[in-house]
Amino acid sequence: MKTCLPVVMLALLASLAAQETTQKRLIMEKDLFDFVWVANPQLSPNGASVAFTRVNCDEKRTGYETSIWIAATSGKEAPLRMTNGKHDAQPRWSPDGKQLVFVRGGDKDETGKPKPGQLALLSLGGGEARVITDLPKGASNPVWSPDGKGIAFTSSTTQEDIQKVQRKKKAGDVQAESEHESDVHVISRAVYRSNDEGYLDPKRHSHIWVLEAPTDSDELPAPMQLTSGNFDDEQLLWSHDGSRIYFVTQRIEEPYYELPSADIYSAPAAGGIAEKLVTIPMGIRDLVLSPDGRRLAFHGSAAEPIRSYSQPDLWVMDVGVGEKPQNLTADYDFDVGDPVFGDNAAPRGGSGRKPYWSPDSHWLFDIVSKQGRTFLVRVDARSGNITEITWGDEAVLDFSVSADANAIVALVSSPVMIGDLFAISSDGTQTRVTDFNRKLWSQLNLTAPEEVNYTSFDGKRIQGWIQKPPDFDAQKKYPLILNIHGGPHAAYGWVFDHEFQWMAAKGYVVLYVNPRGSTSYGQEFGNVIQYHYPGDDYRDLMAGVDEVLKRGYVDDKKLGVTGGSGGGVLADWTITQTNRFAAAVSQRDISNWASWWYTADFTLFQANWFKAPPFEDPQDYNNRSAITFVKNIHTPVLFVLGESDYRTPQDSGGEQLFRALKYMKRPTAMVVFPRETHELSRSGEPWHRVERLEHIVGWFDKWMMGIPHPEFEINPTQPRTASER
């Protein structure tokens, strides 16, 4: 009997595991309403605690709420909520670890419009947070001085704004007719609107301000403006002794006529004339100063030669006038500072992701995306040698390192985990610090995807993933959805994607791959599509579909294709090249490259993607535009568009194809989301994100599974209300 006991126990455990799996339910589109996201981790100076922003959907499910929380890095205590505001973000520890400064937003003015966020201060000794700025255009990006006596921040407030407020108060809150603010846009620059901000005000710029950290609860410190002019100042850093502030700017009126560059300036913290240190021949981000005050580090992509994709590297330079930057990772052929992406990074809350120096200024901590994974690494600040600290099938989305480098906390995501904080030991061991989605996740039957690697038409190796239905049976035949990422210079990877999990739960096999042009596979692989997009990347995608069909569990008569942004470009292109797909959903696409060149929120004045403008080489634009080949489209196609999308304006994408297909009486429809920008799928209004998923799979259900969806018909039935959904 004793020899049989282990067998009996194993059988019992297997039975219990099977029961647990069967008791779990499939993930639903509306589970998004209950997701909790973690953003912007910031370790305390002693490394014992981490402050972060917690994000959740609001009660009406039309937006998001953010609050500041603190957790012990030991993982032994439950996280604590520290602020009671609904729009608190960007927590930053004082050098002594006794206070947090953060940005508080959410208040509304007399017209009901949201007021800009202001800085607030929270004592860890107890008491409520108090707002410490009152600037007409708000305050953000706070940075403590080394001695903890001052706080620098950015604001687009002007002295004229302050004087106007003072005049209104003096006049008894009655605004004179002469002070009427026009809402007319007078445009003289080629870049005049932004996908994130809408129409830009050329007279308003982000500048540096400083204030004394208040010590009296009744005291409201008067901030001092350090910089001014018709240029934006950002990425501010205090010098080692607190006497100066370094920052990044670009003192060029119309920078789109030139290759990317950035100026590093230094300004006296007490006020005075800013001094230019150096012009860097590339755009830079995530500027950090070494603890000894002698060196700067940053992320940047070389501007020359002109390329469609220029790999981000880690650079260092000595502090001083005219110093030259050194590329630490020039021989490391992967992406530094950028994670692979999914559809569920925190939709609000910001990011603290940047390099961190070791206390002896010898090492830099950073992240690297390598073949669909994102690792935490340590880089020798002299030789550039890289040591991986974390590994495995996951993505480090953000991280923080304590001042003594003895504590590291990382925001980690995987295909079955949205993203939680983990303390990282020197040997890479991870200790969970947060687990906000535990209750929901315990109810869901989530499965990890299967990685697939295959050889494309010219011998290039392509990496992808197959997300199968939770109850997958290899003896059955399943419909397949090919889901194409945007960018095009981006990468899928080992990170959570609600969309893929949900499509699989609806009974579809989901294939998502990184064709040529994707990041995390080296400079040559990423840039090979320059002047050839779309093109051979389409052939990589079709080779992936063929690879899955070889496995025998996909019905080749039930193939669907979708993608957003650059993925929308390739979805459009795919259905002009082949009729193998039974249905397509093109999201936030570009169907007419010439039209997009004239209307996007950024310019292509440099020869990154096209060698010349459309009025000089119209044929190149025609040859790469799906609208040119619209007569070839016989696949039923749905277009998903954002009404406020300035990155891929709807009239340069789906609208043109839709109108042409309607003319030819071919099956098509559009779903247009009001108020939504290009970020619809990642940070759009929660209800809109859910409805987007419903419409995508609804279209596939209709054309691949024969399930009626009258909303796509010429005479649709009455739409459901939110309470009926």
Image (cartoon, helix red, strand yellow):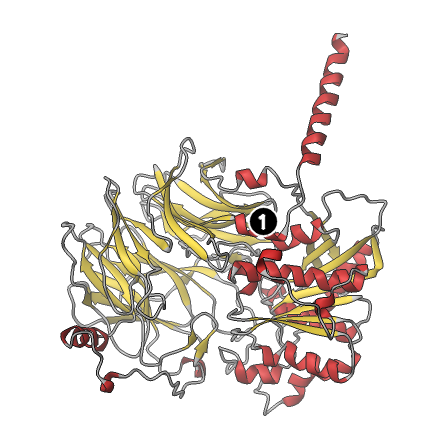
Relative to 415, is 422 on the left or the right?
left
Relative to 152, is 551 on the left or the right?
right
Judging depth in this view, the residue of 344 and 400 nearest the camera is: 344
* Residue density around tag 1, few if under 14, some if 14–19, many if 20 or more, within 10 Å: few
Q: What residue type is labelled 1?
A: Asp
Residue beneath the point at 57% across and 57% down: 343
Report whether residue 536 is seen: no
Give the percent coordinates (x, y) of residue 129: 26, 49
Residue beneath the point at 23% across and 63% down: 134
Judging depth in this view, the residue of 95 and 258 nearest the camera is: 95
Judging depth in this view, the residue of 667 and 294 nearest the camera is: 667
Q: In which quarter of the image is the C terminus?
A: bottom right
Q: In this view, does 506 lie above or below 444?
A: below
Q: How many labels does the image show?
A: 1
Relative to 32, is 127 on the left or the right?
left
Report whether residue 314 is seen: yes
Give the percent coordinates (x, y) of residue 556: 84, 59
Q: Which residue lies furthest to the top in this view?
A: 1
Give the percent coordinates (x, y) of residue 449: 68, 47
Give the percent coordinates (x, y) of residue 44: 32, 43
| Res. 127 image quadrant | top left
Q: In which quarter of the image is the N terminus?
A: top right
Identify residue for label 1. 31
Q: Is residue 459 above or below residue 358?
A: below
Judging depth in this view, the residue of 564 and 146 nearest the camera is: 564
Q: What element carries label 1?
A: helix
Residue beneath the point at 24% across and 62% down: 245
